[in-house]
Amino acid sequence: MTDKNESYYSNIRIDLVNLITKKDNFKVLEVGAAYGETLIYLKEHRNAKEVIGVDLNFDESKKDSYNQTDDFIFGDIEELSLNQYQNYFDVIILADILEHLKDPLKVLKKLKKNLKSDGEIISSIPNIRTLNAFYKVYIKGNFSYEDDGLFDNTHLRFFCKKDMVTLFNMSGFKISYIESALKNYKKKSIKKNINKITFGVFEEFLTTQYFIRANNE
């Protein structure tokens, strides 16, 4: 996750913020926090008590942004120790992160120790079972990687919806919410309309991503 331009990292993830059920004075850890925009938003607009970010890359020009969080840790989440934050967080955000990891199961099990017993993980994960992938691989015969998107050249893992559920279950979490990104598509989206008239039967072939809220058990 190193060769990315600034726009790749600089979005507030309102789609994931809206999945958080905690209301006030909650503590948040975001893995892959980029420059901390989502964390800062949570503190300013959602009454988060404490916000802490983890990211692989440090950008000297963004020091002011990092400093608006309560702590910002730089390093690889697969190697970092967060023992100082055992049973600490109410919310952990993993926005398009698990697909970049060598061992996402191991990381989720590690983060479980940092989450309070009534805490929740909020995550977004790309869906490989989409028609876009089918067309690229089976029609065009092409599995080349790209700068971003489903075939991002930094993706190490690929998931279908069933794999996402299995991953969280094996990590000791219970999924309380899983929803396709179709709900965020514009109102006149062809894919969204097809999904609606077919009662969601073909949802997995139409959506590029799933949003998940999983609770600590």
Image (cartoon, rainbow, N blue to C red):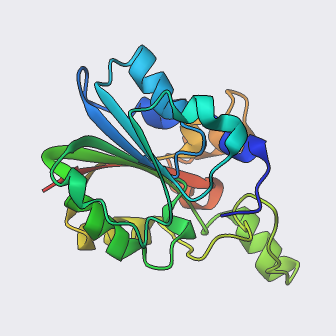
Q: How many marks?
A: 0
The image shows residue 142 at horizontal and vertical percentages of 85, 81
- Left or right, residue 125 beside residue 64: left
Residue depicted at x 43% and y 71%: 78
In-front residue for pair 1/108: 1
The image shows residue 26 at horizontal and vertical percentages of 24, 29
In the rendered view, would you say 149 is above or below 213? below
Residue 85 appears in view:
yes
In-front residue for pair 171/42: 42
Q: Quadrant of the N terminus?
A: bottom right
Residue depicted at x 33% and y 18%: 47
- Left or right, residue 61 beside residue 100: right
Residue depicted at x 29% and y 41%: 91
The image shows residue 186 at horizontal and vertical percentages of 69, 30
In-front residue for pair 103/15: 103
Q: Quadrant of the C terminus?
A: bottom left
- Left or right, residue 6 beside residue 69: right
In the rendered view, would you say 197 is above or below 58? above
The image shows residue 34 at horizontal and vertical percentages of 59, 45
- Left or right, residue 42 beside residue 4: left
Q: Residue 113 falls in which quadrant of the image? A: bottom left
Q: Residue 109 falls in which quadrant of the image? A: bottom left
In the rendered view, would you say 110 is above or below 55? below
Residue 13 appears in view:
no
